Amino acid sequence: MAVGASLLYPSLAMLKAAEPMFTLFANSPIETAVTSTFLGIPLLLVTYTSSVIPSIVGCYIDSKFEGLFKRIVPDVIKMFVVPACTLLSTVAVTLLIAGPVVTWIGDLLAAGMLAIRGFNPVLTGMLVGGLWQALVVLGLHQAFVPIQLNSLLAQGFENVICNMQCVPFVTMSVVFAVYLRACDAELKQRALPASISSFFGVSEPSIYGVALPLKRSFIITIAASAVGGGIMAFFNCSLFTQGRMGLFALPAYINPTEGLNMQFWGLIIALVVSCLMGFILTFLFGVPSKYLTSAASEDKGEASPSASSQTKQEVFVAPVAGEVVALEDVDDEVFASGSVGKGVAVKPSEGTVVAPADGEVTMLFKACHAVGITTASGAELLIHIGIDTVQLDGHGFEAQVKTDDSVKQGQPLVRFDRDVFSSEGYDDTVIFLVSNSASFQDVVRSQAGAVRCHRSRTSRGSRVVHFVVWGHGCSPVPRAIVEEDVCHANRHAHVRHAFTGLSVSVWCKSRPYP
């Protein structure tokens, strides 16, 4: 927020209106007047009111400066010096370099579209339609608004940027196909209102809530929108007044002198073709298999009481050896609150994190401080090594796998240097979560203890996750499990889950775990 506010500071607007000292890139799309300097460096004052990307880039720069200052500033003054130095450095770099460069990129894209229009209108229409959704995600689409307004004022119509008109309708059809095809209740709940919103021109819920997370749906949206843009360019569809998006934009394409001519009907043809293309491709290929649970099998399970009581169990080993602590005791508000997912934390006694189960590495951060694994049964496991260790930027971490690798239970994932954590002042607690815990009835933590292995049982039938932790010479009895018959002579415990009635037999070793 502070970075964005600094870019919009009123005094900067006054400096921009001053007499220019000289002009950079004169007579080009990125012409910039220099009216003042900062420490002898030209201050490139561009317009930041129509794009959020400079602020986002500024936040990224801020994260780098913060990590740097945390490492070099003494702990005694770190609380006061780090935020001040970080903000000053970030604002300076953003104003002098990052902000102007990002704005120039948007301006050059807009100029490039106009140049291609003179060479091949249909190709331009396909580029505008296909790239528009990506430009919206990046916030660069606002660079085209001045060009569109200028064309309307100078010519009375605009026939380049308007080729993106198919985008909200294609997004609607794609997301509606997801709603019809998917069986996942949470996804369907997001998809239907998002589809309706896109029909009226507000596509952000569809983009960020459905299309982008599914990836293939987003690619199909881009492809179908490109086809629609090409058809619009072929019929020379034109915008005659500045209107809204979605359904409310259609009247703006009616020629004020000729009425419903072929330009308008060309728009209708483009909408129909692109929407059908997006719907069919998404329905056939755009929804990942994990969201395509068979409705027939679900109905069968509901119809049979015995089937609903049966469970498919999956066993997870501990990601690291050490002392188990409650998640709510972790010194991080985000993890402790359970907002990321439910699970446990381990104070490690060694520096190797292993795979808790067979699965696929779906996420490995660049800093190697966190890794995500998705099991065959759909459990999404997150292992986060240390608190705020992303600031180390990979120092002290050594990845043993990469994204999309298939891993076996117990296979090393990441090695980390606990001495580096200690010397840099970072907590080395390893956090182990089921990030999609909302998909299960409950996640139950066992009593804390020193562990060598960490197991959980995932019940897919009743959708319950049990975190089971070995203690010193005792049976692994989670808090939500009540003891029935405990035979200490045989070191055997027969336990029953308090919620589902699921019976589990557990054997202890003849000696406690170290």
Image (cartoon, rainbow, N blue to C red):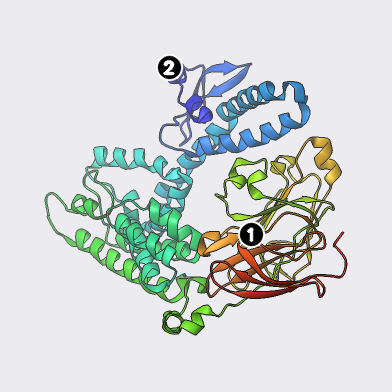
Q: Position of residue 404 (x, y in %)?
A: 67, 66
Q: Residue at x 47, y 35 (%)?
A: 28
What mark, if any, has residue 199 been given in the picture?
none
Amino acid under disc 2: Met
Tell me if mark 1 has few (under 14), some (14-19) or many (20+) residues whose alpha carbon lies within 10 angstroms of its own.
some
Relative placement, left or right, of 345 versus 199 is: right
Q: Residue at x 29, y 64 (%)?
A: 270
- Closer to the camera in the image, 88 or 237: 88
- Closer to the camera in the image, 240 or 288: 288
Relative placement, left or right, of 20 versus 42 is: left
- Looking at the image, is 379 positioned above or below residue 11? below
Q: Indicate which label's residue lies in the foreground, 1 or 2.
A: 1
Q: Residue at x 84, y 70 (%)?
A: 509
Q: Position of residue 411 (x, y in %)?
A: 79, 66
Element marked by disc 2? helix
| Tag 1 near tag 2, CB within 8 Å | no
Which of the 4 image quarters holds residue 265? bottom left
Asked if residue 240 can be seen in this view, the reply is: yes
| Residue placed under numbered mark 2 in the picture | 14
Which of the 4 image quarters holds residue 482? bottom right
Element marked by disc 1? loop
Where's the C terminus, which quadrant? Answer: bottom right
Amino acid under disc 1: Arg
Asked if residue 229 can be seen in this view, the reply is: no
Mark-to-mark CA distance, 1 and 2 = 64 Å
Relative placement, left or right, of 18 versus 492 is: left
Q: Residue at x 23, y 55 (%)?
A: 247
Q: Position of residue 442 (x, y in %)?
A: 55, 62
- Looking at the image, is 330 positioned above or below residue 309? above
* Total numbered labels placed on residues in the image: 2
- Closer to the camera in the image, 390 or 281: 390
What mark, if any, has residue 479 been given in the picture?
1
